[in-house]
Image (cartoon, rainbow, N blue to C red):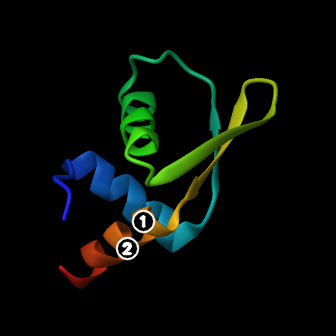
Amino acid sequence: MNDILPQQRLLLELLVMSGDIAVKSLSDDCLLWRTLGECEKSQWIEINEFCPDFYKVNVTDAGRLIGKEGEKS
């Protein structure tokens, strides 16, 4: 399986448990947006703007597998 950082695994586990989330646009250098960007680049999540300054984040099938693996630990 891919090498995954703890904050990436946490984000994916939260998305698997809670479903889609809305995120306010913030600086790209904050931890949340860095983690979102890393997960999107790995195709574990999708990010889509749904109104000015707000984005919908949903987990992909690949991200769901990783998030569910964390539940077993």
In the image, residue 70 sits, relative to residue 20, either above or below, namely below
Marks 2 and 1: in contact by CB < 8 Å? yes
Image side of residue 65 versus residue 60, left or right: left
- The answer to whether 29 appears left or right of 15 in the picture is left
Q: Residue 65 carries which label?
A: 2
Report x, y in % for residue 54.
72, 33
Residue at the spot 50% in from the left edge and 62% down from the top edge: 15
Q: Residues within 10 Å of mark 1 (few under 14, many from 20)?
A: few
Secondary structure at badge 2 equals: helix
Q: Position of residue 53 (x, y in %)?
A: 73, 24
Q: Which mark is residue 2?
A: none
Residue found at x 42% / y 65%: 62
> Which of 12/46 is in front?
46
In the rendered image, the vertical position of residue 4 relative to residue 65, given as above or below: above
Q: Which residue lies furthest to the bottom in this view?
A: 72
The residue drawn where x is 35% and y is 77% is 68
Q: Residue 50, position in %: x, y?
A: 80, 38
| Amino acid at circle 1 | Ala
Coordinates of residue 44 in the picture (x, y in percent): 43, 54
Q: How many labels does the image show?
A: 2
3 relative position to 70: left or right:
left
Asked which quadrant contains residue 37, the reply is top left
Q: What residue is shown at x 56% (from left), y 68% (from top)?
A: 18
Look at mark 1 in the image and give the residue it sits on: 62
| Quadrant the N terminus occupies | bottom left
